Amino acid sequence: MISYEKYKSLFHDYASRYDKSDGRVELKIIHTEAVVSIMDKICEQRHLPEHTRALSFLCAQFHDIGRFEQLKQFNTFLDHISVNHAALSCSILEENKILDELPENDKRKILIAIENHNKLEIDSSVFSAIKDARDPQTLEDARECLELCRLIRDADKCDIFRVFAMEDMNDVIGVPEESLVSETISPAVLCAIRERRSVDKTIRKTHLDYWISFLGYFFDMNYPESIEIARSQGYYRMPFERTAFTSPETKAQIAEVFTVLEDYMNHFSGIRGVPKILFDFFKCHPSLALAFSGGTDSAYLLYAATACGCDIHAYYVSTPFQPAFELSDARCLADSLNARMTVLPFNVLENKTVKKNPEDRCYHCKNEIFNHILKAAASDGYKEIVDGTNASDDAGDRPGMRALKELNILSPLRECGITKKALRAYSRDAGLFTWNKPAYACLATRIPCGIEIQSEILQNVEWAESQLSSMGFEDFRVRVFPEPSGNAGTFAARLQIAGHQLPLLMERRAEVFSLLKERFGSVLLDLETRASSL
């Protein structure tokens, strides 16, 4: 266990060597404490493992420890006229043996994260370590290292907005605010903002460029939690709102910058509809096979991978459990993205356990389907398989999750913390027709566990739901169960609809009843209305 108080004391003991009468020393102590607090909030909101949280605390506590020596030697916090403070922080941690009681692997990850916290982008070697990992432990360490890099970069940026807004600008950028009122934003800097890129310090020409580069930090944030923290603080707006810029051109430029920024935060995407954390996932996994259903989740994943330049091949396993429209939607989306798609016909009911429909049917079904995909993907040269499981999917309610884990199937949406609500918003932003497609669980879910699944039952359910859809019903289910009368092979239909569609049902009750009686012995209405899946 890492002693938080011990490492806090080590930090303050080190900082006490420097002249606290210089307000800039105190500024960095306060900044460190704030970054630690923000880091804790991000980790809590993202429900990160305790080990990652402990290491992230150390990253936050020591990320700027080099600032004190930088100030002493060069009398400035400006790296470009002094020294790289992140590299100096790592050197000081090493020289003072501050992290030496940690396991060497943990120490290495912390130093890599601190070294990367102020770079324009995370070094490509951090991503390469994930791609090149050859065993599970090495892969886990590489992923945690990347997570730490992302966390410290986000937590640091969140508090830099406060420093930018509340501290004396002489201490922050070396000139008073009054020096900026007549300046304009350089074309290269304005171009970076328009393109939603972090501002490279080498293209800054004016002091106002320096200010604008702080706003560019938003484009590098990795987590929606970080965006929300910085946005809710409101610090990023304050310096611009209190400064009376004299140039009409400057006022127009700043208005444009904030329009771009607010739009970005509303959608949080670098590539249209793709958050940076998912982009980085595809950077680490450039060649993938996708278990593709044509539903909202896997459709978005196919779009995102394609948009990010990933070599991805979609595999649609056609079974009796899927209605015909799902295959039609899948083909339509793949064609619109110019993505490769292979249809694999497969009668999953040939598996006797699946046919018997036990409570863990989904586990056995997933095993069959994903092994089918694994075999086809391997023959096409793909080593990694992804699926559309998202962060809203509850592993406790999904027996199939166990099969995914056993087969080492990757779930990027879940891994990157992308919820169903978020991916619908991203899908809409990307212009995908699937963005508001209702969730459509496989047809086997309409049959109670323990009742043997027959092809004819599945066909009747598909027919009934298709007929009702043509009548205007949306996001509903036709569930079936053995006819209470006991007639062998006869099934009753129980209609489960959303509350807002009850008036439509009452209006067409006789028509619905007559229609469903063609295939079912009894037709019932579930009075516990269905919650919308949208």
Image (spheres, helix red, strand yellow):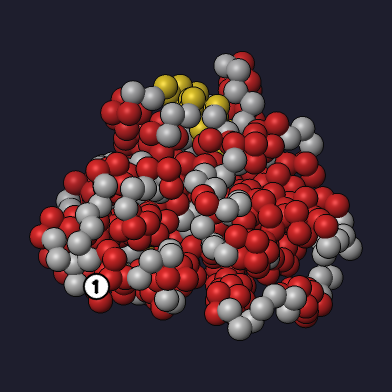
Mark 1, secondary structure of its residue: loop
Identify the residue at image location x=17%, y=51%. 471
Q: Is residue 432 left or right of residue 393?
A: left
Which three-letter amino acid code belongs to the residue tagged 1? Thr
User: 189 above or below 30?
Assistant: above
Which residue occupies the foreground of this view, 285 or 120?
120
Q: Quadrant of the C terminus?
A: bottom left
Residue under numbered circle 1: 243
- Where, by quadrant of the figure, is residue 299 drawn? top left
Residue 488 x %, y %: 50, 50
Which residue occupies the foreground of this view, 356 or 268?
268
User: 357 above or below 505?
Assistant: above
Q: Quadrant of the N terminus?
A: bottom right
Q: Is residue 372 left or right of residue 102?
A: left
Identify the residue at image location x=81%, y=56%. 94
Residue 528 x %, y %: 37, 73
Extreme-right residue of the structure: 101
Extreme-left residue of the structure: 248
- Residue 224 makes an appearance in the image: yes
Residue 403 x %, y %: 67, 44
Which residue occupies the foreground of this view, 350 or 175?
175
Extreme-bottom residue of the structure: 21
Q: Is residue 185 left or right of residue 69?
A: left
- Where, by quadrant of the figure, is residue 257 drawn? bottom left
User: 142 above or below 106?
Assistant: above
Residue 57 x %, y %: 68, 68
